[in-house]
Image (tube, rainbow, N blue to C red):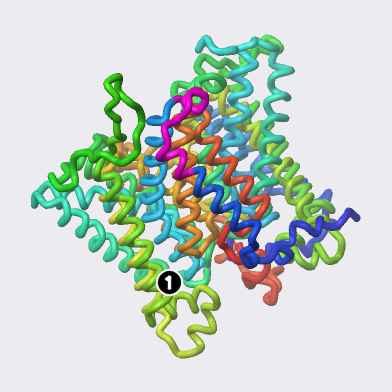
């Protein structure tokens, strides 16, 4: 009949990341030096001409980093649930938005933003638990039906949230200790009298980044240093064998799903405070999670971090330098990743 | 399970001609042809024509999912691409582009571009399998939606294009209720019989074999990727034709037409209708359109999405094969071979 597939497409043919070679190390060091120079040095005029201004560039990079932190919060739960249960939870964006609304209600009623964030996590973790027990456990091993059910849930959920909270945009009120902006040690320009102008940046956004890094480290520790983490990793690799060794798989599933949903809810509060809460955000963050997880590799938390970094930076830098084609940049990254490494950057071949 | 669950293709290519002239087809055809005699203009276009258009888009999904094991959420994006081509090269009153080319150039061009776009989507999506395909195509559809919304140079951004008119050919304005209904019916019938034929053709059988076991087919020497991409291109033709009709029906195209909601709507239609037979998507489309139209009387103007969502959930829980599956369940089983009804193969 026809020619067989080209051998290059066989995912097994491509190994994992090889041992770090000296050449690669030099490249990395060079990249770090260039980045440090970009951040700290005073820019020559030609560079300012290319990249608009140092301030614009630095803001774009910082915005990209904080957005990456937010994306990581949303996508890490998504990727964990997917890796363990092979369950594409297309209602993940809905969980994000519900978390934001719950956090808003609790935060404004009690007056404590932190309480709102905690409520976002706890309530959504409970919702996730209920979803897992009532819905997904009944459809176990039936990937497509689970996915269809999550689509149904997202439709109903989005509509009910619209009924409850209306189409208006909500804005969180940040506590004083999170509000305001701080000066960063990056000189953007010099005044005529020689005084240096430092870059100022919203303190809260930096805190989002810090929180994302903290949660990332926490997740990594949990997955690699605790017993339940070991069970989760074993489940990602081979669910059936884990069950066969007598572990309570359903407990592991429930914990992971609750954690994933809770992280989405927390991300809702955190992200809603950085930006705003409105209908339609659910789709935006679902797309973000999808792209981040596809690029990073499904089921890998490290992959989610790398994917979030790439997508967050690409989105914000694209927004500054080619506004109408920013989405295309994200899309190109997706396509290039898929064509070079279909399983994602950190994913393992299925 | 459902979508790809091996519907027995064992009947094979033998009963090819007999398949088309069944009593059921004759009765259904007569009923559909006679429908304008009893239906009001509203029922003719808003229900009849619209169902047929959505049914065609869902049919393109059903072919990909049912025969190819690839569940795509980007079908409405492909239809929308055809719509944008009609708007850009044909006539619009948004003041952007509108080259005013004649319909007999614009329409084939629209369908061609849509099908090529479909092939590109397919080329991207076939790198993945099963559940991943849903994620990729959803990402593609959402990215396209945001792109058309942000881009004013080519797609005129949020407002999109308005004032798109169906052509007047042979002295008939094809957006008038009765001609438009027959136009939709003719297109749907062509697509339906093409799928019916294609499913039993050599290509269709190969595609289904690839769905059931891509590795084995690759080992035999088939180019799995090429077959899948070709299937995407073919379904792009159906979706593209539906897209042209949709744009004539609405008279406008905007990012809202290709948003995530409509994309999921198509999946709902395909799932509710069932994946076993090309008639499924049309049944699903009729059911969904009727619910959408009359839910306002039942649950008020706002909450019909909840109703659709709940109905969808019930169908997914009760009958994985949609309404056709319900029919199958209560019918005495004759030709289902027991060893082949499992969910092996593509897993979708």
Horizontal relation, residue A84 to residue B137: left or right: left
Residue extending farthest left? A110
Quadrant in the rendering for residue B48: top right
Report the predominant secondary structure element of the magenta stretch: helix
State yes or no: residue A50 in magenta.
yes
| Closer-to-camera residue (A87/A318) | A318
Relative side of A120 to A51, left or right: left
Residue drawn where x is 84% and y is 53% of the image: B202
Can you identify the residue that label 1 sits on?
Answer: A138
Residue pictured at 26% horizontal, 60% vertical? A121
Location of the C terminus of chain B by quadrant is: bottom right
Label 1 packing within 10 angstroms: few (<14), some (14-19), many (20+): few
Q: Is residue A17 above or below residue A91?
A: below
Magenta span includes A206: no
The residue shown at (58%, 44%) is: A333
Q: Is residue B143 left or right of residue A73?
A: right
* Outermost residue toward the bottom in this view: A246
What span is colored magenta in the figure? A35-52
Figure label count: 1
Q: Chain of mark 1?
A: A
Depth check: A250 or B47 in front? Answer: A250
Looking at the picture, how far across and down is residue B245, in whole percent? Answer: 60, 27
């Amino acid at each position: 009949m026809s020619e067989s597939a080209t051998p290059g497409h066989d995912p097994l043919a491509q190994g994992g990341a090889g041992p770090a070679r000296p050449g690669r190390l030099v490249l990395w060091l060079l990249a770090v030096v260039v980045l440090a120079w970009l951040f700290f040095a005073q820019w020559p005029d030609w560079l300012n001409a290319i990249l608009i201004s140092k301030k614009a560039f630095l803001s774009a990079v910082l915005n990209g980093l904080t957005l990456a932190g937010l994306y990581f919060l949303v996508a890490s739960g998504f990727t964990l649930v997917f890796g363990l249960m092979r369950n594409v939870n297309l209602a993940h964006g809905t969980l994000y938005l519900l978390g934001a609304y719950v956090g808003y209600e609790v935060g404004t009623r009690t007056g404590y933003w932190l309480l709102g964030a905690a409520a976002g996590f706890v309530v959504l973790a409970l919702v996730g638990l209920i979803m897992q027990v009532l819905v997904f456990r009944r459809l176990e091993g039936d990937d497509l039906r689970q996915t269809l059910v999550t689509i149904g849930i997202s439709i109903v959920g989005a509509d009910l949230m619209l009924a409850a909270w209306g189409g208006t945009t909500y804005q969180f009120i940040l506590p004083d200790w999170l509000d305001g902006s701080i000066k960063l040690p990056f000189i953007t320009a010099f005044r005529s009298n020689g005084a240096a102008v430092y870059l100022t940046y919203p303190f809260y956004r930096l805190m989002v980044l810090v929180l994302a890094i903290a949660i990332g480290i926490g997740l990594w520790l949990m997955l690699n240093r605790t017993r339940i983490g070991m069970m989760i990793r074993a489940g990602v690799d081979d669910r059936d064998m884990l069950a066969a060794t007598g572990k309570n798989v359903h407990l592991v599933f429930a914990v992971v799903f609750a954690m994933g949903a809770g992280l989405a809810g927390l991300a809702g509060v955190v992200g809603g405070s950085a930006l705003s809460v409105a209908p339609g955000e659910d789709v935006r963050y679902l797309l973000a999670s999808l792209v981040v997880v596809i690029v990073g590799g499904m089921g890998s938390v490290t992959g989610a971090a790398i994917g979030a970094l790439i997508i967050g930076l690409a989105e914000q830098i694209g927004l500054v330098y080619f506004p109408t084609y920013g989405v295309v940049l994200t899309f190109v990254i997706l396509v290039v990743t898929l064509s070079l490494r279909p399983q994602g950057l950190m994913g393992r071949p299925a | 399970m459902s979508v790809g669950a091996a519907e027995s293709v064992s009947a094979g290519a033998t009963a090819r001609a007999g398949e088309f002239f069944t009593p059921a087809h004759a009765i259904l055809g007569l009923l559909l042809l006679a429908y304008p005699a009893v239906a009001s203009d509203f029922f003719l276009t808003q229900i009849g024509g619209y169902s047929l258009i959505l049914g065609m888009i869902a049919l393109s999904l059903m072919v990909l999912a049912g025969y190819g094991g690839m569940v795509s959420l980007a079908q409405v994006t492909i239809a929308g691409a055809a719509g944008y081509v009609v708007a850009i090269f044909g006539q619009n009153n948004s003041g952007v582009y509108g080259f005013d080319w004649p319909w007999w150039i614009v329409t084939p061009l629209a369908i061609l571009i849509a099908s090529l776009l479909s092939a590109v989507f397919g080329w991207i999506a076939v790198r993945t399998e099963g559940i991943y395909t849903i994620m990729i195509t959803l990402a593609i559809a959402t990215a396209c939606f945001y792109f058309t919304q942000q881009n004013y140079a080519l797609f005129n951004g949020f407002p999109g294009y308005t004032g798109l008119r169906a052509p007047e050919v042979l002295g008939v304005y094809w957006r008038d209720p009765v001609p438009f209904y027959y136009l939709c019916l003719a297109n749907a019938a062509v697509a339906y019989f093409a799928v019916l034929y294609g499913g039993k053709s050599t290509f269709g059988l190969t595609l289904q074999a690839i769905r059931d076991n891509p590795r084995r087919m690759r080992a035999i020497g088939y180019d799995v990727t090429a077959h899948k991409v070709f299937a995407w291109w073919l379904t792009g033709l159906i979706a593209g034709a539906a897209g042209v009709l949709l744009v004539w029906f609405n008279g406008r195209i905007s990012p809202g037409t290709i948003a995530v909601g409509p994309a999921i709507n198509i999946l709902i239609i395909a799932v509710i209708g069932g994946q076993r037979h090309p008639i499924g998507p049309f049944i699903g489309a009729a059911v969904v359109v009727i619910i959408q139209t009359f839910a306002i009387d039942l649950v008020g103007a706002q909450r019909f999405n909840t109703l659709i969502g709940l109905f969808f959930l019930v169908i997914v829980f009760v009958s994985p094969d949609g309404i056709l599956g319900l029919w199958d369940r209560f019918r005495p089983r004759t030709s289902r071979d027991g060893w082949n009804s499992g969910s092996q193969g593509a897993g979708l």
